[in-house]
Structures are given as C-alpha cells and as structure tokens.
Amino acid sequence: MILEIDVGNTRLKWRVLAADFVCLERGGSTGELAFLAELYNRFPAVKRARIACVARDSVVDELGEAISVLWGIPVWVAATKRTHAGLQVAYKDPSRLGVDRWLAMLAAYKKAIGAVCVVDCGSAITVDWVDSAGMHQGGYIVPGIEMQKKMLLKATGQIRLEQPVKDRDLSWGCSTEEAVNFGVLRQVASFIDGIVTELSDTGDAPTFFIAGGDAEVLLSVMTTSKKFKCCPELVMDGLEVADDLSVL
C-alpha cells in the first residue's frame, strides 16, 4: 500500500492506494495530523509514503516524523526536475517551478500522451502548456477566486461583503456582494476561456485538464468547459509518475 499526501497552501489531501494502485480511501485535512493515526489503525500495511508540498518545509518535517513513528517507513518528497518521464520544464532554475505544477503536468502528459494544458484552480490559479514533444512552453499564475476577493476588500475602504452569495452566476450584480462575486468569477472564467481558444487554434492543440478546489464552480460558467477533463487528484496522480522507484 502507498500513502500519498498533497499539501497545499490552505489544506491537504490524502489517499491510500492498494498494490494495484486502486484508491482504497481518500480525504482531506486543514492541517491537523490526527488523521494519520486514524489511517494507521485502518491501513497498518502501508509500505511507502510520498508527499507533494507547496507549504512551509516544517509541514513536511512534521508529516515525515509522524509517518515514521506510526509506520516505521521513510517519506519520499517530490521535487521538481528539469527533465523527467519525457517532460522538460521551461524554467532556467527548475526549483523555482512549484512542485504541484510539475506533478500535475507529469500526470496530464502521461494521461494524454500528447500536448496538454493544465489549469489548477486553488489559492492561486496556474496554467501550464506542454507541447506534444514534452517541452513545457511556460505558464501563468494569477490570484485565485477567494484571493481576488480578499485583495479587493483590502484595497478598498468602502466595499464590505456582509451577505454570502452563491457563485456559479455571471449575471449583473444587484448588490455589492453579487457585484464582487460575479465580477471576479467572470474575470477568471474569461481568462481561462481565452487561453483555451488561443491554444485550440494551434497546430499542436492540447488536451485540457483542470484541477483544484474551484474547478467545479469555474466549469459551471466557462464557455469552453466541455473541452476539459476534470481530474481533482492530478497532483497526486503525478506522484506516481515522479516516484519511479515505488516499493509497494
């Protein structure tokens, strides 16, 4: 069995895989590590643990120590490489490319066996394009939906959001809350739609993948949503590709 953990900026996701890579259980946490003891009680036969982390290094240290105490096994931590599994990143310094983006590209490229565009909609929204030869053409990073709302509130003294508003609507806002929510959503959706339209017209049109906590809400309003494959665990799927020395 393998324990996989994807540590993001605000929460972490985990899953336990059987020897045939079938997922036995999955879940999430806001940072508390109590879930590890519960997992040990149900899956004491875990033989390998692997982690993707974009949070502070101390989180990996805490996870590694807890896993070592419980299962008595070391933890394999993913790190971005310039070339791996047919993918070559565009960054001059690969270590500057977030490991979550790298893993998502690895997984998507393996799934598509060709050009891919990966959109990850979390705290930040990242977009990466890989051509059919495995060459990373570069990417974009913009603030995520919630981050944009917080930035707007912080920079403007007169805007106050006092009532919750459901997303999934691009109509005209008839309250400050609606105007902010609908406006931010429309901006992000248009940003992604524009990229899809641009890349779809190239001679090496990619397969489009989307992941992240806000993927579902964005797919509900994007005009290009039917072009996307939604893969919520794309980063953890990339761990399998990156960790090519797995011991089950």
Image (spheres, rainbow, N blue to C red):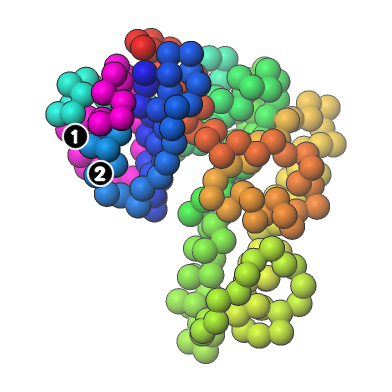
Residue at coordinates 60% horizontally, 80% vertically from top-left? 177
- Foreground pick, 174 / 69: 69
**Disc 1 to disc 2, C-alpha distance:** 8 Å
Outermost residue toward the bottom? 158
Query: Is-magenta flag for residue 27?
Result: no
Task: Tell me if 98 is positioned left or right of 47 in this view.
Answer: right
Residue at coordinates 28% horizontally, 45% vertically from top-left? 56
Going from N to C along the chain, the mark reached first, 1 or 2, is 2
Query: Is-magenta flag for residue 66?
Result: yes
What kind of residue is marked 2?
Leu
Task: Tell me if 176 is positioned left or right of 96 in this view.
Answer: right
Q: Determine contact: label 1, label 2, CB under 8 Å.
A: yes
SS for dot 2: loop
Outermost residue toward the left? 69
Image mark for residue 66: 1
On the question of residue 155 being in view, the answer is: yes
Q: Quadrant of the N terminus?
A: top left
What residue is disc 2 on?
A: 33
Q: Is residue 111 above or below residue 162?
A: above
Where on the picture, by quarter, is residue 70? top left
Q: Could you tell me residue 166's position as x and y percent?
A: 63, 70
Q: Could you tell me residue 23's position as x and y percent?
A: 48, 26
On the question of residue 128 being in view, the answer is: no
Task: Tell me if 41 is positioned left or right of 80 in this view.
Answer: left
Q: Residues within 10 Å of mark 2 (few under 14, many from 20)?
A: some
Residue range of the region highlighted in magenta in the rendering: 40-67
Q: Could you tell me residue 107's position as x and y percent?
A: 56, 25
Q: Residues within 10 Å of mark 1 (few under 14, many from 20)?
A: some
Where on the picture, by quarter, is residue 87? top right
- Foreground pick, 24 / 33: 24
Query: How many badges with numbers are in the image?
Result: 2
